[in-house]
Image: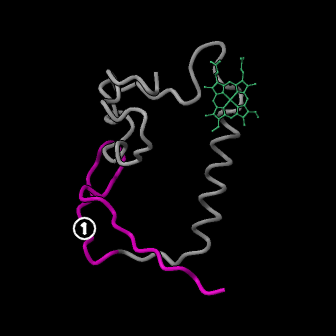
Amino acid sequence: MHTDKTLWGSDADKFNPMRFSNGVSRAANHPNALLSFSIGPRACIGQNIAMIEAKTVLTMILQRFRLSLSGEYKHGPVDQPTVKPQYGLPVMLQPLEN
Ligand code: HEM
């Protein structure tokens, strides 16, 4: 299903993270086309630990950078349903010296 061209388009077999730029539910022709850990009684039992691992790795990467708001940031909080920056949150990452 994850390489089905009717769902993902003609570049379904290509690594293209930008297809998720408008959120997972808009990446394919169907909002539930991405089932990384499967679903139902034989779904992945390691989903929670895998997600914790991914967050841990992201944390370790971010610890090596200084984060600051880009000059392009435009303040515009919006409720949808939690408060979010409606124009995005462009952030600059600067490597920390060792
Ligand atoms: C990013 C990481 C992972 C992904 C994307 C993933 C994905 C999946 C998927 C799609 C299935 C269903 C396979 C099928 O339908 O035949 C599955 C099953 C399974 N996964 Fe994972 N998995 C991940 C990590 C893990 C981890 C960390 C563990 C164990 C600690 C784990 C243990 C299992 C087991 C035991 C099953 C078989 C469940 C069953 O058949 O009842 N997985 N996984």
Residue segment shown in magenta: 70-98
> Which quadrant of the structure image shows residue 47?
top right
The quadrant of the rendered image in which ligand 1 is seen is top right
| Residue extending furthest toward the top | 41
* Mark 1 residue CB less than 8 A from any atom of ligand 1: no
Sort mark 1 into few (<14), some (14-19) or many (20+) by Cα contacts within 10 Å.
few
- Percent x, y for residue 65? 55, 75
- Residue situated furthest bottom in the rendering: 97
Above or below, 98 relative to 35: below
Prevailing SS of the magenta stretch = loop
Q: Is residue 53 left or right of residue 12?
A: right
Label 1: state its secondary structure.
loop
What sort of colour scheme is used for the picture? one colour
Number of marks drawn: 1
- Which residue occupies the foreground of this view, 98 or 59? 98
From the image, tell me which residue sits under label 1.
75
The kind of residue tagged 1 is His
